Image (cartoon, rainbow, N blue to C red):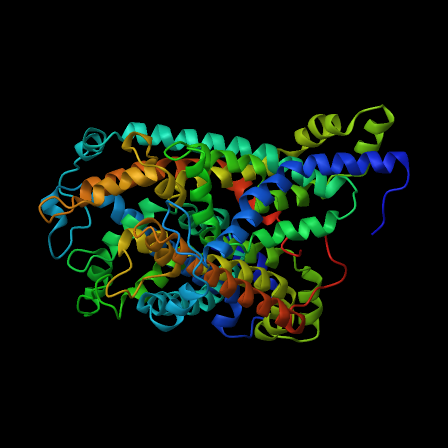
Amino acid sequence: MLAKQASTTAPARPRSRSWLRRHRQQVQTVLTYLLLCAGAVVLMVPFFWMLSTSLKTLDEVNVWPIKWIPSKLMWTNYVDVFQRVPFARYMLNSLVLAAGGIIGSLISSSLAGFGFSRLRFPGRDALFFVNLTVLMLPTWAVIVPHFIMFNAIHWLDTYLPIIVPSFFGNAFYIFLFRQYFLGIPTELEDAARIDGCGTFRIFVQIFLPLSAPVIATVAIFAFFYYWNDLIYPLVYLRSQLNFPVSLGLRMFQQANMGIIDYPRMMAAAVLSLIPCVALFTVAQRLFIQGVVMTGVEK
Amino acid sequence: MNLPKTKMAIREAREGYLFILPWIIGYLVFRLGPLLFSFLLSFTNFKGAGMPDWIGIQNYQYMFTQDPRFLDSLRATFLFVGGFLPLSLIFGLAVAVLMNQQVRGITVFRAIYYLPSVTTGVAVAMLWQFVFHKQYGVLNAILSLIGVRRIGWLVDPQWVMPAFIIMALWGIGGTMIIYLAGLQAIPTELYEAASIDGANRAQQFGSITLPMLSPTIFFNLVTGLIGAFQIFENAYIMTSGGPNYATYFFGLNIYYTAFRSLQFGYASTLAWILFLIIITLTLLVFGTSRRWVYYAGAKLG
């Protein structure tokens, strides 16, 4: 590949220059790759360490110098995770939370995003600005009142305090939907209106089918959020069988006679990350473009 | 305010309010209402049961004059934000410039660099807990290759903040990807014109890239600021606020005060101070933005 590039770029450069000058392009490419690979290795070391530890025996974890690769791959660690705690149940619970959160976020945020972008009403832009200020509001500023409120209506230890608010819009997702809807040409809408189509039908039958990228982006963001979230489950949930993965993982932090079982803890961590990594791998392109689409200019 | 005049406009306005109605309800019930409620609570000694007693500004007095934990969490939070935020802005940009190189396979690298930022939460905190392990952790193992003695990353008050910053920098993929979008939005003609005028790479970066990227830097600064002040999970999992309260961040303080000690009133006082700090700093950043954020041409969207 380098030779091919050299043959196309070399004639353009004067031959009298030094070697470095003549091969500047190639040297730069090689350096770029070196840097890219070095960074990638550094970023991947923690993941590798997690995988490697998850397949070790407890004895092999507590050695110095460290062992990079287990001498025997202990796949049974992964089986133990499910036997020691109801891990399958935790995964299922997380899935329920994520599904509820995604559905709520998609419905409420797409509706509000449409209202803020395609319909005119007094105070619209001011209200949208109010929506953006919500991004500045820390979870911590409202969590105590939320707790008191949900306690008063006996919602504690259920998923309602986590899922129900998602049906009332999320500032960032509304922003994403609004930006996307602004980019859809008005001609389609106008044509549909002339045909006597109502606003809600225009939203459902014209805008939503055109919005696959933003719908997918919001769904993925919401999945990561609800799958990983610790704060709300920590505050609202009590019984073990209601725990999502984020809370269930903490069971592995408890030391048994002063020793933390790192191999099984890492095996549980790997299991909990698999859905995120898998989703990211499948939707990676769309995901990165989705973020790109957010329009930082605003 | 222009009130709608025609029948159609009135109808459109009504529909507009209907579309955003869930959001309006959500804003009042889950945002504005609780925020005001917590302001009221901050003047009480409410403990989660019975009627709250109005105690005036006693919570605020206690916080500013007596509570050592308040100072701990203030120090820890500001140290973290002050260390992490500038580094994340600089590293994020450097990595984004690297990711913007037109070399084969760059999309694979983009995915690899972005991946850590989508894996967050408890699992990642646990993974880092073992990376930082003093006796058997991989970080000390690598450092020992260059003769560095074992560092107590999570047990030494001197080293725990660097550890948290390193860990947070691992996840700057989100910052990076937004920078990348900003870089790709810069018209290439600008660079072509500059190189015809004889500007070298460094000059081009200083006179084209940075000014054109200033809205993106601004965006990353504001979102990074708001996010970094709320740090919680990593400390909750890895250190529980220790050693010696060195990572007793504001979020942790509020959580423990409210849900371990059941001091709902005092936790609301702390929460309001955190809220005011974030709002003040954000407004300060917005205030300076006129001086350094450059918007090319008409605003998009």
Q: Nearer the viewer, residue A32 or A252?
A: A252
Is B153 situated above or below A295? below
**Residue shown at the point (20%, 30%) measured from the top left:** A79
Where residue A80 appears, x then y in whole percent?
18, 32
**Residue B79 in view of the camera:** no
Residue B15 picture quarter: top right
Where residue B102 appears, x then y in whole percent?
55, 55
Is A158 situated above or below B85? above
**Residue shown at the point (16%, 51%) measured from the top left:** A67
Residue B222 picture quarter: bottom right
Q: Nearer the viewer, residue B215 or B140?
A: B215
Q: How many marks?
A: 0
Where residue A284 appears, x then y in whole percent?
49, 41
Q: Is residue B290 left or right of residue A6?
A: right
Where residue B90 appears, x then y in whole percent?
48, 67
**Residue B169 in view of the camera:** yes
**Residue shown at the point (67%, 55%) measured from the top left:** A298
Q: Nearer the viewer, residue B173 or B67?
A: B67
Q: Residue furthest right?
A: B6
